[in-house]
Image: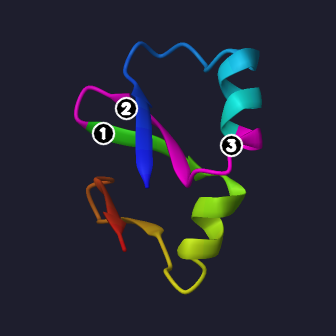
Amino acid sequence: IGILSSVSGRPFTRDVLAHFNSSPVPLGLATVSETTLKSLMFNKPAQRLLKDILITTQFDKQGNESIYI
């Protein structure tokens, strides 16, 4: 699965999202702020590959978040 990441805080363009959604290649789009993953989404081909994998976000008592796969 290829993953394209944006660190600028700007959303992905309509063209990027259109190509992402129509691609037969398994792809992911990630948004990162400093060292924190803010969003992660997969297109349909990637979702089919990952159908049995659960990705969750958990927070500790101090409010720090962790991603678990």
Proximity of marks 1 and 3: CB atoms separated by less than 8 Å: no
Q: Is residue 14 above or below residue 49?
A: above
Q: Nearer the viewer, residue 10 or 16?
A: 16
Q: Nearer the viewer, residue 34 or 16?
A: 16
Secondary structure at numbered mark 1: strand
User: Which numbered dot is residue 36?
Assistant: 1
Q: Nearer the viewer, residue 69 or 34?
A: 69
Q: Is residue 37 left or right of residue 50?
A: left
Which amino acid type is marked by label 3? Ser
Q: Which residue is mark 2?
A: 32
Q: Residue placed at 58% from the left, 50% from the top?
A: 25
Q: Residues within 10 Å of mark 1 (few under 14, many from 20)?
A: few
Secondary structure at numbered mark 2: strand
Q: Which residue is mark 3?
A: 23
Residue 67 horizontal/vertical position (percent) = 35, 62
**Dot placed on the residue nearer the N-terminal end, 3 or 2:** 3
User: Which numbered dot is residue 22?
Assistant: none
Is 30 part of what is drawn in magenta? yes
Bounds of the magenta span?
Answer: 21-35
Can residue 10 be seen here? The reply is: yes
